């Protein structure tokens, strides 16, 4: 049992570490873009993709458990 708990703790630490590294990477990219004066352009280009992702997530959450299925039983 102790071995299992150690493995779970290691897995959690790896996931948490990856999230922290990803956040630092995103922050560094945003900082570089801001210093070069291209943050507004990057924001303008990324906005349509972010809106589409939010709409897709909202459709999934609103529909409930079977919302991913289309009429006729297909996905």
Image (tube, helix red, strand yellow):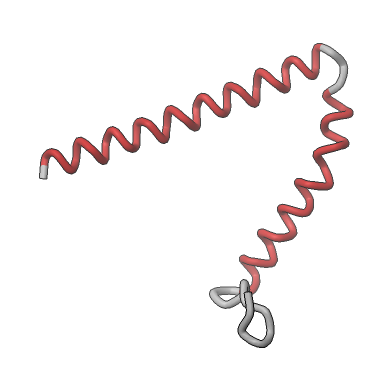
Q: Is 22 placed above or below 3 here?
A: above
**36 sits left or right of 3 in the view:** right
Q: Position of residue 56 (x, y in %)?
A: 71, 60
Pick out the residue farthest to the top. 35
Q: Quadrant of the C terminus?
A: bottom right
Q: Position of residue 34 (x, y in %)?
A: 80, 17
Q: How many marks?
A: 0
Q: Residue at x 23, y 38 (%)?
A: 7
Pick out the residue farthest to the bottom. 72
Q: Position of residue 38 (x, y in %)?
A: 86, 21
Q: Is 61 placed above or below 3 here?
A: below
Q: Is 28 placed above or below 50 here?
A: above
Q: Residue at x 83, y 47 (%)?
A: 48
**14 sits left or right of 71 in the view:** left
Q: Position of residue 69 (x, y in %)?
A: 62, 77
- Res 6 quadrant in image: top left
- The answer to which of 11 and 57 lies nearer the viewer is 11
């Amino acid at each position: 049992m102790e071995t299992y708990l150690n493995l779970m703790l290691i897995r959690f630490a790896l996931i948490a570490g990856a999230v922290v590294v990803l956040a630092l990477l995103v922050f560094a990219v945003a900082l570089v873009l801001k210093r070069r004066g291209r943050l507004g352009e990057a924001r303008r280009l990324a906005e349509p993709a972010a809106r589409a992702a939010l709409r897709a997530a909202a459709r999934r959450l609103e529909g409930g458990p079977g919302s991913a299925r289309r009429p006729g039983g297909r996905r």
